[in-house]
């Protein structure tokens, strides 16, 4: 049985939140990273578990918070993000409230939206 299928059976609410985050954030967020972010945001006591999972997934990753270059996005994606930011004020990842330090300590590489081109 695939890991994702097991997670659906064991923690369906977390899986639903993971897939929602992926849909909201867009193509720059992988399933593994989204799952880890949702886990940290909703169950901070599982930090060691997330940290171990990140090490096993990609031990060579340069951990930290990075930002997309809006100039490289399609016009549709730029418009979608601008509408989101106008309504909510911050990206889906930022709304989770996880600090950059926690992301680094967990060993994850997260690509967030950054600032829109032109301000």
Image: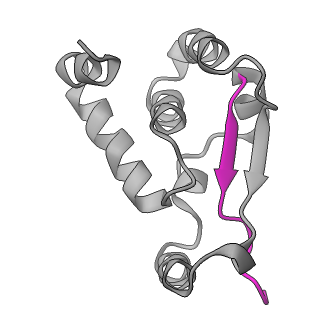
Q: Residue at x 57, y 73 (%)?
A: 89
Q: Residue at x 67, y 50 (%)?
A: 111
Q: Residue at x 57, y 63 (%)?
A: 91
Please say if 104 is above or below 45: below
How far across and down, in percent of the image, does residue 12 sit?
21, 29
Q: Is residue 89 magenta?
A: no
> In the picture, residue 74 is in which quadrant?
bottom right
Closest to the observer: 11 or 70?
70
Closest to the observer: 71 or 119?
71
How far across and down, in percent of the image, does residue 95 sit?
54, 54
**Which residue ends up furthest to the left in the rendered image?**
9
Closest to the observer: 1 or 62?
1
Q: Which span of residues is magenta-colored?
A: 107-119
Majority secondary structure in the magenta region: loop
Please say if 89 is above or below 8: below
Q: Is residue 111 magenta?
A: yes
Please say if 60 is above or below 27: above
Q: Residue at x 70, y 74 (%)?
A: 72
User: How is the protein colored in the picture?
Assistant: one colour
15 to the left or right of 52: left
How far across and down, in percent of the image, does residue 65 sit?
76, 45
């Amino acid at each position: 049985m695939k890991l994702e299928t097991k997670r659906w059976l064991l923690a369906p609410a977390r899986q639903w939140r993971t897939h929602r985050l992926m849909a909201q954030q867009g193509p720059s967020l992988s399933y593994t990273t989204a799952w880890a972010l949702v886990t940290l945001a909703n169950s901070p006591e599982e930090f060691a578990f997330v940290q171990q999972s990140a090490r096993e997934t990609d031990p060579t990753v340069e951990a930290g918070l990075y930002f997309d270059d809006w100039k490289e996005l399609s016009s549709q994606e730029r418009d979608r993000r601008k509408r989101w930011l106008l309504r909510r004020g911050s990206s889906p990842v930022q709304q989770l409230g996880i600090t950059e330090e926690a992301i680094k300590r967990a060993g994850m590489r997260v690509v967030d939206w950054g600032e829109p081109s032109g301000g």
